[in-house]
Image (cartoon, coloured by chain):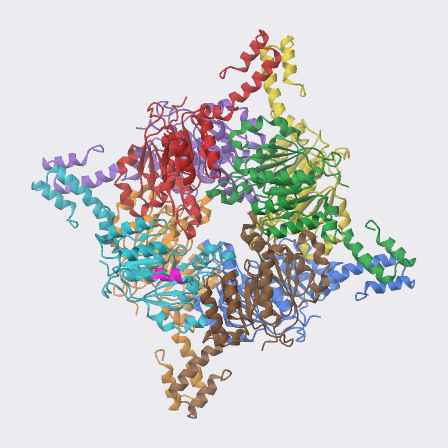
Chain colours: A brown, B blue, C cyan, D orange, E red, F purple, G yellow, H green
Amino acid sequence: MKNDKILDILEQLVSGKLDPQQAEKSIESYFFSDLGFANVDHHRSKRQGFPEVIFGQSKTTEQIVKIAENILEHESTVLATRLSAEAMNAMSRRFPDGEKDEVARSFVIGIPELDLKKIHGTVLVVSAGTSDLPVAEEAVVTLRAMGNPVEKLHDVGVAGIHRLLARMDILKSASCIVVVAGMEGALPSVVGGLVDVPVIACPTSVGYGASLNGFAALLGMLNSCASGVTVVNIDNGFGAGYAASIINRIGLNK
Amino acid sequence: MKNDKILDILEQLVSGKLDPQQAEKSIESYFFSDLGFANVDHHRSKRQGFPEVIFGQSKTTEQIVKIAENILEHESTVLATRLSAEAMNAMSRRFPDGEKDEVARSFVIGIPELDLKKIHGTVLVVSAGTSDLPVAEEAVVTLRAMGNPVEKLHDVGVAGIHRLLARMDILKSASCIVVVAGMEGALPSVVGGLVDVPVIACPTSVGYGASLNGFAALLGMLNSCASGVTVVNIDNGFGAGYAASIINRIGLNK
Amino acid sequence: MKNDKILDILEQLVSGKLDPQQAEKSIESYFFSDLGFANVDHHRSKRQGFPEVIFGQSKTTEQIVKIAENILEHESTVLATRLSAEAMNAMSRRFPDGEKDEVARSFVIGIPELDLKKIHGTVLVVSAGTSDLPVAEEAVVTLRAMGNPVEKLHDVGVAGIHRLLARMDILKSASCIVVVAGMEGALPSVVGGLVDVPVIACPTSVGYGASLNGFAALLGMLNSCASGVTVVNIDNGFGAGYAASIINRIGLNK
Amino acid sequence: MKNDKILDILEQLVSGKLDPQQAEKSIESYFFSDLGFANVDHHRSKRQGFPEVIFGQSKTTEQIVKIAENILEHESTVLATRLSAEAMNAMSRRFPDGEKDEVARSFVIGIPELDLKKIHGTVLVVSAGTSDLPVAEEAVVTLRAMGNPVEKLHDVGVAGIHRLLARMDILKSASCIVVVAGMEGALPSVVGGLVDVPVIACPTSVGYGASLNGFAALLGMLNSCASGVTVVNIDNGFGAGYAASIINRIGLNK
Amino acid sequence: MKNDKILDILEQLVSGKLDPQQAEKSIESYFFSDLGFANVDHHRSKRQGFPEVIFGQSKTTEQIVKIAENILEHESTVLATRLSAEAMNAMSRRFPDGEKDEVARSFVIGIPELDLKKIHGTVLVVSAGTSDLPVAEEAVVTLRAMGNPVEKLHDVGVAGIHRLLARMDILKSASCIVVVAGMEGALPSVVGGLVDVPVIACPTSVGYGASLNGFAALLGMLNSCASGVTVVNIDNGFGAGYAASIINRIGLNK
Amino acid sequence: MKNDKILDILEQLVSGKLDPQQAEKSIESYFFSDLGFANVDHHRSKRQGFPEVIFGQSKTTEQIVKIAENILEHESTVLATRLSAEAMNAMSRRFPDGEKDEVARSFVIGIPELDLKKIHGTVLVVSAGTSDLPVAEEAVVTLRAMGNPVEKLHDVGVAGIHRLLARMDILKSASCIVVVAGMEGALPSVVGGLVDVPVIACPTSVGYGASLNGFAALLGMLNSCASGVTVVNIDNGFGAGYAASIINRIGLNK
Amino acid sequence: MKNDKILDILEQLVSGKLDPQQAEKSIESYFFSDLGFANVDHHRSKRQGFPEVIFGQSKTTEQIVKIAENILEHESTVLATRLSAEAMNAMSRRFPDGEKDEVARSFVIGIPELDLKKIHGTVLVVSAGTSDLPVAEEAVVTLRAMGNPVEKLHDVGVAGIHRLLARMDILKSASCIVVVAGMEGALPSVVGGLVDVPVIACPTSVGYGASLNGFAALLGMLNSCASGVTVVNIDNGFGAGYAASIINRIGLNK
Amino acid sequence: MKNDKILDILEQLVSGKLDPQQAEKSIESYFFSDLGFANVDHHRSKRQGFPEVIFGQSKTTEQIVKIAENILEHESTVLATRLSAEAMNAMSRRFPDGEKDEVARSFVIGIPELDLKKIHGTVLVVSAGTSDLPVAEEAVVTLRAMGNPVEKLHDVGVAGIHRLLARMDILKSASCIVVVAGMEGALPSVVGGLVDVPVIACPTSVGYGASLNGFAALLGMLNSCASGVTVVNIDNGFGAGYAASIINRIGLNK
């Protein structure tokens, strides 16, 4: 019924298949459906191809497990991010088939199989230093949970630019690139100047003093002299991975 | 020669077709080519599908016209942004076939014909208020100059949310959406919650007092509660359009 | 004696009921009373319809209990906010009839019965996400302690705007609305555009990175494109509830 | 037709008074009406009791006059703020019955007659210094255009607190108070401590150096130690007046 | 020798009382002495009437006790501020005659007797709320340690302005006033408008959200509309007391 | 009558010299007088020893001249600061005996003769660079208008510390010192470490880039490692001079 | 006499060559000389190898010419920076042998001949974009005026990293490098990672929106992940050139 | 092979010493070598004279020890900074010949012997207060680990400027000076005005309130009125020492 038009409903009413009360209800729910409204669990994955993600930071372990159970009743994949060690262990015990990632502080159940008809290619996650790894890996986990093949290029910050240049082949073969960096946040500009695919820049709070908890990197990325770079919030590896995933199925998701 | 391998050059050397000095030079220039390096004018459009754009803000009218002439020797399209009225008129006189856009403060020569094999669909540019128009139209011009069909939805800010909801059909049919807003910058969150395509948020410096010249809108967009929203610099309509254009040909540009 | 005029005192002096020294003292104390000055406990509730509220954050458990005892000697209602678990338990033991609210971190003794002649209607408290609940519930407790009927609408953030639109009836029936939101703080603009009653926006420190501990939400709300929205300090649920309560009895409190 | 229910439309359809196409259209427009959506000019004044206000700052004189003409076709009152001297003169010539206010940089046509059944009382506008007058008078004009009786108390800043205390009678008799102040922005706290009615604080950009263009005053007001004070954006006299006006008819506007 | 002139030394050299090497050394040390330079312990109290103060915050208990012992070899008064409970107890044990102040987190040994020829009068310390007490009491202890009679006026914030006005006599009788306040920091402006003596404003970090850890109060005080108000750093009760003490002996200290 | 007590009034009432209405009025006006309240022009100079100062920045030339005329009806001295060249010339024409200071952008009429019984000594105004002169001279003019002898020491910034040290005699002989500096604002710390008199630091907006329009200097001064330094707003030469003047007559002004 | 010791003076005194008054004066002036104190014009060039530089920004044309004349009486080189077109022309007319640089907004008289015994090598000035040229050229002029050979590498920003890499030879042959960049300020990190000589980073105010007038570039440079990078103020090309010049003669200037 | 030219490789190829595949590989690795690229451990010390430094802050004790072991296989010196007490002890146990510095929170193995042909002289590290010691000593350790003789001058802040002036001899004899200061950060300006050698300013986070965690000191240093001062990040003692070390061997390191 989801693809019906209001007109269809009205015709059913005229033909007597629906009475006015039924029709009124159908129209209302239809209207919301057309807008993507209605019960969150059911429609979010229909609307956006992926169910709600559990942001673990301000939730108790019990809440996290319970929400995961609830989502699994309707969906085959669950992603939980920003988990404490305790929450990660509780998830492991409850969902032994799930995958725990301690660096990314994440837990995934039911990573979908790759369906190359639904994506444009491999997403590359590049990071500047080893301290940026938790954020970069959060992007990696998110990308995998959303059905993308992922390549990684870690510790290739601009102070040793050759480390990046030596891997031009990987840079050139990606369909979309997530670049994670703290401190001065210069890496997205360099990467953006070398490739012709979308670059999503994710600043991290790595640094000290005038890094202002990631604000210096954020400002650097927003002012990137390379065209085509867009930016997400500080330490938001999930957001970067999510955006890259949506970009990676543009034109294929309908 | 651009697709040769170093090995080919070396084999030509061994076979005597090149002498060592010639081979050295070829290798060097090859190396740069493989990285996308070398003469900017020639390679930028090869590397990224679009030649350099003239950012008019800190340039004299003479410089702008001269650079345009120079690019046109190698390219069929030229885009100049942030032009003064004077510079726009000078461009019009010099390039009578070009297209002047006074709202967007831009000038384009040689807008390419649409080639639907090279793009995924129509890019939608949404703006919150009439004061955001110059930035929104800069995005529109950029998108058109880069070969994208564009739809516009102006003056649909969140204080009258019905204006946006009434156009769900347009929102749903876009392959990628640029959202331009000043003041509290809330529109990208609302749009991002309604669609499943990439949303690029562009804050504007529209507002006063605590809008901090667009910083309030920028922060709002970075903190968007809708996943999949990425952000560009304040008033950077060009950057938003450029990023959307690159996203709109992902997987098709090789 | 509180409603006497200086003239009355002077006439008592002339008639010999007061001697000059007595009259001087009466006049002085009268003057302060007329300004609303004098002993805080007695006059604050007379002046503003509600006794002092205990802000528990920087007080010891002993101090909180003692102040509550002191206020109760003169008043029938006591509200204490920002209580630690320890302080809340101590209050429960000392005042077994009081009401403990763990989410709102508050304790109320003697919630007044509703007197519909003294208020204009129901106050609605809307919140964007589950993490905003402690602040929203602090507003709720404050409103109830000050004699207002309260409705709640939680977790209706702008990224899923349909959740809000589906409850237009509740929005439309409120006499005043408190909107609590963190991250980009966009919800008050949307609500403010839908209703014609006062909207009080309360930013929360929910978010991370560029949320700047609630500053992004605060700026967003101050720049709201919806007219009629006013703002209180970050996480100040009490202040939002207090302001709404004063608004809700405008014209009825004399 | 605006108060019809969807059911009515459906019944008209069943009875043949409407055909399916007509019914579809009616339902759609009805739906929006129920949400307060639809043609802005017609519905805004129905929804919020006041038509759109013309914010003159970023508009040409021609645009301003034209919008005013358009609004007057449907409404009896028009308010335009932030007008240049040129725009104010053009409005005067075009609408000779309108009222020009050079201090408030505003123009009003058709100030409504006072209807004391629709408001709770007089709104008081208090300002700290003579430099705050343009913002304070913008609030005054807005209040008058929206049908409120207004009192003013100018130049009563906290450095000479006696000037304020000497007018306690005026403070006490207001139903709602707008307080406008620059520099340290302390006046709303003092006023808020003296009265029991809603206080709306409006910071101004008056000051220099560490006043940060009004940010110091804004922060001061947000941190007010007086309960019940809410805040609007810097220099936003219109917003303060609008909010006070909405508060002043709470419970009376339906 | 401290008041000798270089000329005296030279004359001693010419007369043979000093040889050139001795004279060179005398001149060098003389030069520094004339500038107030040399061994810190000896000259600081000579130069400024008070020995070095021990700032305990970043020092170990052992260091604090040791420095106190060292100063006491040359001076009769020692003041230590920002002490931990542990450090305060260690000082108490080592210097049983010293005075421990737990609110002010300070310890003083040898408070000097009042010598009314060396000071102009009583210094008044005013504070806005009970949470400002630690900073206010640090100012009090500093003033007492430097030989000033002190009066206190606590909890007289501007939200209940009558509490301050009721004590005009104390305000009027002070020779210098220290005003301590957090949140919006408005109290110094009000006090400054009521008196004609120097007012030193000390912001505190009391507050939350947009108080920005005392920055709102600091900005408010710097923008005070009352002339004659000067400001010290956030929470710097010691600095406020020290400055007031120096002001209180102007013209008497030579 | 200004020194009467309420008791006197009451006794006059009892004795029939005043009727109750007259007595009521006298008491009211008396009460304000005791607080220093009442007509600004008359009482400000009585309360603070100096009449209102005309801050010329946001006033028209006509307003400035008119206010000056008004003040001169009651006072012998008038100070106007932040005057435009036009306003200064108008003042010169209207008050030919007044003194125009183009560097300080100020105008004074009736500088009082020095009365050494009312002040403690000479106030020294020190400035760091030649660009700080306008602010420093505003302090000088203010000091002179308020009856203080003034010495100046210009262009002695810390980058050439010898220039300051060479003038230790002047530093040592001042009763109070105003230090004006832009850029890093280090001069007050150095001066504060050399003297034992009050030091008032006045930051200026001199500098560029990271000077943040004087904020860097302001922060530097607030963090001064020299005790006894207090700070006024950026570019507030008037405020610094006013505060120094009040300090310079402490204990002598009653 | 400048290299005499105090002892020498004293011995002259003993031997009767100086009388005590003469000796006192000599000692004082000597003392200052030893500290680098005394008459600025004479000693500054002795102390630091370069006379005072004229910062033209806040000076009149007359002042600039006059100071230049004054310096030339004692020195062979004069450098004036931040000159208006008018000041530059006036300098050209007055000093026809001087060298005008319109891009650098500077004027130099008497550029010294290169003396390779006094410097370590060539200083390289690298800039990111053409808009950074005025700042970069100010550094170049300063370096040349202070006797350094200079190489330039303009428009090699990180978005086209190959342009920089192609010039490794120039980078490798410099003794010290000044890197000038606006926007995200990433270039110094990349350069710093490629060389082993001192890198001085100079941010420019080039950019818009979130570039915060050069603050984003400044923060980026301070957070550079390349060791050995130090930073000067925004747009401070003179300061960068001056620092590089001092570094370039380390160990050779005595 | 490292100093070969590409031509050499090609000639070896022509002469049959290398086959094309071998030559291709050699050229690639050669190319990177020429740029300073390739295996980090081997080339970093060749390129910059010092191997990678271990930044201990975000690493586990195990990681730190392991990296140290790895570096020692190729290098004779290892420096680790920002170590916890635990990490420092683990390093001591594993490398008993290493040197532990608890104030500097650092560990060095194999401090090189001084080779005066490779450096220009002694580097002086000056600090303002005792709280700045950890940062100052980090600079000292870094300088020593990189082969520089170091002098120290601690606790010579500008509030007692004589302490600095008394040590002019040490200031004058340094080849390069690192100045470490918190609070107002004025010391580098004073030092920079006294010497003619490079001054590297390092702000510290020492201070409170408006020191903004070192930002006040940082801004002060960037705005230094003394030419030739360059700045590093807050608390970055390592960076200051590293930069000074590179400066100290300019012209000698090839």
Q: Is residue A243 visible?
A: no
Residue at x-position 57% and y-position 52%: A216
Counting from the top left corner in percent of width and height, residue A158 is at 67, 53
Residue at x-position 68% and y-position 59%: A193
Q: Is residue C98 visible?
A: yes
Image: magenta residue range: C133-139
Q: How many callouts does the rendering have? A: 0
Counting from the top left corner in percent of width and height, residue C81 is at 34, 55
Depth check, front residue: B238 or H160: H160
Looking at the image, residue E34 lies above or below residue H116:
above
Using residue B143 as the reference point, say whether residue C47 is left or right of it: left
Picture quarter containing residue H171? top right
Picture quarter containing residue F119? top left
Using residue A227 as the reference point, say whether residue D58 is left or right of it: left
Counting from the top left corner in percent of width and height, residue A69 is at 48, 72
Looking at the image, residue G11 lies above or below residue B16:
above
Counting from the top left corner in percent of width and height, residue F1 is at 20, 33
Quarter of the image where the N terminus of chain G is located: top right
Question: Is the magenta region chiefly helix, strand or loop?
Answer: helix
Depth check, front residue: C170 or D101: C170
Depth check, front residue: B240 or H25: H25
| Residue at the limit of the structure toward the bottom, as seen here | A15
Looking at the image, residue B171 lies above or below residue G123:
below
Quarter of the image where the C terminus of chain G is located: top right
Residue E5 is inside the magenta segment? no
Picture quarter containing residue A176? bottom right
